Image (cartoon, helix red, strand yellow):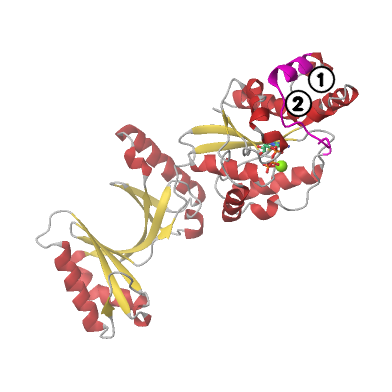
C-alpha cells in the first residue's frame, strides 16, 4: 500500500493544450516552492504528491479545488484491504455508509457491480452498518483505474482560482486597511502575482500604519510566499496640502493625494513589468469613492488598467473574506489614521476643475519618488 495525496484542479481544463501544460507546470512549481521535499507527479489532469505533504499549506495554493489523502493498492488486493482501511478510518463509529465509485478504463465489470460487491463485503465485516446513499455517516471513495485502486474518505476544499502567476504581475496599492488586502488577494486568486506598494504620505502617516501594512503583507505571504511590501516615501502631499489650504481648496486634498498615488503606482508598475494596478475601492463606501471622484482618477493612471475587484461589494462581504483569509485582525489593529484628511472632503469633484487647479500647484512639478 502506498499513501499519496490527490490534488484536483479545475479551470485548467478549459484551456488549450499548451496553456494547460503551462498552467499545470506553474501549479506544480508553486506546490514545490512551499513543500520542497515532496515528490510531485502529474498524470492525466490530476496531480499526485508523496512524501511530507502539509495539508495546511495545500489549502492556500491557488488553483487547487480540493485534495484527498489516498491509499493506493492493486485492484486485486482490495477485497482483503478494504475492511482494514475502513476500520482504520473510523467505520466502527458510523451507523450508515455509502461507497462512491469511480471507474476509468476497460473492465469486465460495471461500477455498479463493484459497488454492490464492496458494500456486501463491508456489511459482512461490520454487520451494524446500513447503506444510506443520500446522507451517510461515512463515505468511502473507491477509484478504479485500469488494474489499480485508490481509496479515500475525505475531500478537503482548496482555495480554487488559477495558479498564482499565470496571469502575470499586478501592483497592489495596499494601505493595510480592510479593503485593499482583500482586493489584492482576489486578484492573486485569479492568477496574478502581487507587488504590494504602500504610499507613506510623509508626514501624514506614521510608522504605525507602515507596521500594520507590513503585518498584513506577512499574512498575504501564506498565499504568495516571499511577497514583499515596498514602502514609498513621498513628500508631495505635504506640499500639495499646504497650497490647497492657502487657496481654500482643502476639500480636494484626498483627490490630489489619490491622483498622485495612482501616478506613483503606474510608474512603479511600468518599471516592474506589472500589467496593472489593484485597489480596494468600493463604490460609495467613503467620500473619495463616489462615481464622480473615481472619474477624476481616470487620467492619473491612464497607461495601465486599474482593477477594483471590490467595486460592487458591501462592506460585510469584504469583511467576511478578510476574516476567511486571515487579514481582518491585522487590518483593524491599532494604527493612526491619515492626518491630511480634511473635515468636509469633496464627493463631487469635476475633472476639469481638478486639472485646472493641478496646473497651478507648485507641487505638481515635484518629480515622482525614486524607487
Ligand atoms: P482600505 O480599507 O484598503 O484602506 P479605504 O476604505 O480606507 O481602503 P481609501 O482610503 O479611499 O479607502 O483608499 C482607497 C484605496 O486606495 C485603498 O483600498 C488602497 O488600494 C489605496 N490606498 C489608500 N491609502 C493607501 C496608502 N497609504 N498606500 C497604498 N495604497 C493606499
Ligand atoms: Mg484605509
User: Does residue 95 lie above or below 41 as drawn?
Assistant: below
Q: Measured along the vertical axis of the image, is residue 51 above or below residue 126?
A: above
| Front position in the image: 246 or 83 | 246
Residue 358 % position (x, y): 77, 18
Drawn side of residue 114 relative to residue 5, left or right: left
Q: Which residue is mark 2?
A: 256
The image quarter containing residue 234 is: top right
Of discs 1 and 2, which sits in the foreground? 2
Disc 1 or 2, which lies upstream in sequence?
Answer: 2
Residue at 57 percent across and 24 percent down: it is 304
Instruction: Confirm if mark 2 falls within 8 A of ligand 1.
Output: no
Q: With respect to residue 300, does 160 lie above or below?
A: below
Frontmost residue, 235 versus 76: 235
Q: Residue at x 54, y 43 (%)?
A: 186
Question: What label sits on residue 54 in the rendered view?
Answer: none
* Quadrant in which residue 232 is drawn: top right
Badge 1 vs badge 2, beta-carbon distance below 8 Å? yes
Q: Position of residue 257 (x, y in %)?
A: 75, 29
> For ligand 1, which image quadrant applies?
top right
Residue highlighted by disc 1: 363
Viewer-proximal residue among 147 and 127? 127
Q: In the depicted view, which residue is nearer to us: 358 or 364?
A: 358
Q: Is residue 361 magenta?
A: no
Range covered by the magenta-colored residues: 339-359
Check mark 1 vs ligand 1: CB closer than 8 Å? yes or no. no
> What x and y, as percent, mark residue 88?
36, 76
For residue 116, side relative to residue 134 (left or right): left
Q: Secondary structure at mark 2?
A: helix
Q: Is residue 152 visible?
A: yes
- Left or right: residue 342 versus residue 60 is right
Amino acid at each position: 500500500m502506498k499513501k499519496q495525496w490527490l490534488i484536483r484542479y479545475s479551470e485548467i481544463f478549459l484551456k488549450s493544450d499548451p496553456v494547460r501544460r503551462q498552467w499545470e507546470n506553474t501549479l506544480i512549481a508553486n506546490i514545490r516552492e512551499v513543500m520542497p521535499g515532496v515528490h510531485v507527479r502529474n498524470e492525466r489532469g490530476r496531480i499526485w504528491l508523496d512524501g511530507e505533504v502539509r495539508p495546511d499549506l495545500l489549502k492556500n495554493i491557488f488553483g487547487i479545488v480540493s485534495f484527498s489523502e489516498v491509499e493506493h493498492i492493486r485492484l486485486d488486493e482490495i477485497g482483503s484491504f478494504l475492511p482494514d482501511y475502513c476500520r482504520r478510518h473510523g467505520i466502527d463509529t458510523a451507523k450508515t455508509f455509502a461507497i462512491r465509485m469511480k471507474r476509468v478504463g476497460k473492465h469486465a465489470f460495471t461500477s455498479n457491480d463493484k459497488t454492490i460487491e464492496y458494500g456486501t463485503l463491508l456489511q459482512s465485516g461490520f454487520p451494524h452498518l446500513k447503506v444510506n446513499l443520500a446522507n451517510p455517516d461515512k463515505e468511502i471513495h473507491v477509484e478504479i483505474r485500469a488494474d489499480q485502486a485508490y481509496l479515500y474518505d475525505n475531500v478537503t476544499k482548496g482555495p480554487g482560482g488559477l495558479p498564482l502567476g499565470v496571469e502575470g504581475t499586478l501592483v497592489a496599492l495596499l494601505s493595510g486597511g480592510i479593503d485593499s488586502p482583500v482586493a489584492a488577494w482576489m486578484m492573486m486568486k485569479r492568477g496574478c502575482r502581487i507587488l504590494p506598494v504602500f504610499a507613506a504620505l510623509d508626514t501624514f502617516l506614521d510608522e504605525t500604519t507602515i507596521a500594520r501594512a507590513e503585518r498584513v503583507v506577512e499574512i498575504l505571504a501564506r498565499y504568495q510566499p516571499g511577497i514583499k511590501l515596498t514602502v514609498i516615501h513621498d513628500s508631495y502631499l505635504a506640499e500639495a496640502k499646504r497650497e490647497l489650504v492657502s487657496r481654500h481648496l482643502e476639500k480636494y486634498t484626498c483627490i490630489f493625494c489619490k491622483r498622485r498615488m495612482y501616478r506613483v503606482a503606474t510608474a512603479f508598475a511600468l518599471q516592474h513589468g506589472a500589467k496593472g494596478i489593484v485597489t480596494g475601492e468600493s463604490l460609495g463606501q467613503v467620500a473619495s469613492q463616489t462615481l464622480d471622484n473615481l472619474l477624476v482618477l481616470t487620467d492619473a493612471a491612464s497607461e495601465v488598467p486599474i482593477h477594483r475587484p471590490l467595486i460592487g461589494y458591501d462592506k460585510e462581504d469584504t469583511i467576511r473574506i478578510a476574516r476567511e483569509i486571515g487579514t481582518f485582525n491585522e487590518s483593524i489593529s491599532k494604527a493612526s489614521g491619515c492626518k491630511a484628511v480634511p473635515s468636509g472632503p469633496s464627493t463631487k469633484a469635476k475633472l476639469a476643475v481638478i486639472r485646472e487647479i493641478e496646473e497651478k500647484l507648485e507641487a505638481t512639478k515635484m518629480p515622482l519618488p525614486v524607487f
